[in-house]
Amino acid sequence: MKSKLKLGPEKLLGMLCVVLGLELVTGPARADVWTFETPSENIQCTVGQEVGIQSDITCTIIERSGAPAQPRPADCASDWGHTFSMRETGPAQVICTETSRSKDGFSKADYGITGEFGGFTCHSSRQGLKCTNRDGAGFFLSRKAQKIFSSSGSSENSGK
């Protein structure tokens, strides 16, 4: 997969200061961020990798059907069942957050492509997007079904 943005916050701030005519001394970049989406533009992901900190991936499925992969928590007052996240080790989870409906600015992960980055492997297919971490935990997302699975292979799912 193509990396879209490979600027750490320090370099980005440094570039902004140059554009604004300010001086700033920056150190080496310590973080990388990659974004990608499926060809349908319905699933969008962001992967963050920072030196000394576990990488994370967050994927959002914009349009989905069926029951969510996990029941909505009582304290979730925002969108539920659209945003999935995990670190490079440990379980995947559904996140209670507003769903961005923007379909701009992401590199395409063509169907049939498998990408490995930041402790994750993601495979884009016509059936959906499957991402796993170093432990083998992860999620599968498609318009019809969303699943979270553990490293043991058991899953929570919606749709069929």
Image (spheres, rainbow, N blue to C red):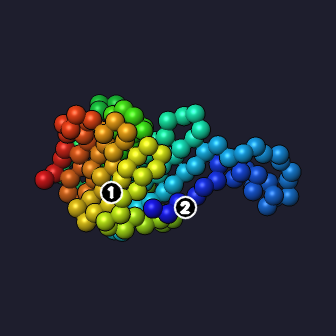
Asked which quadrant contains residue 26, the reply is top right
Position of residue 113 measured from the top left corner of the image (x, y, whole percent):
35, 63
Asked which quadrant contains residue 154, the reply is top left
| Quarter of the rendering occupied by the N terminus | bottom left
Instruction: Give amino acid for label 2.
Output: Lys
Residue at image coords 31%, 65% = 112
Whether residue 98 is visible here, answered yes or no, is no
Position of residue 139 measured from the top left corner of the image (x, y, whole percent):
29, 46
The residue carrying mark 1 is 123
Instruction: Give amino acid for label 1.
Output: His
Which mark is first along the chain, 2 or 1? 2
Position of residue 65 measured from the top left corner of the image (x, y, whole percent):
21, 55
Q: Farthest left residue?
A: 160
- The reply, left or right, for residue 21 in relation to residue 158 is right
- The reply, left or right, for residue 54 in relation to residue 115 is right
The residue carrying mark 2 is 4
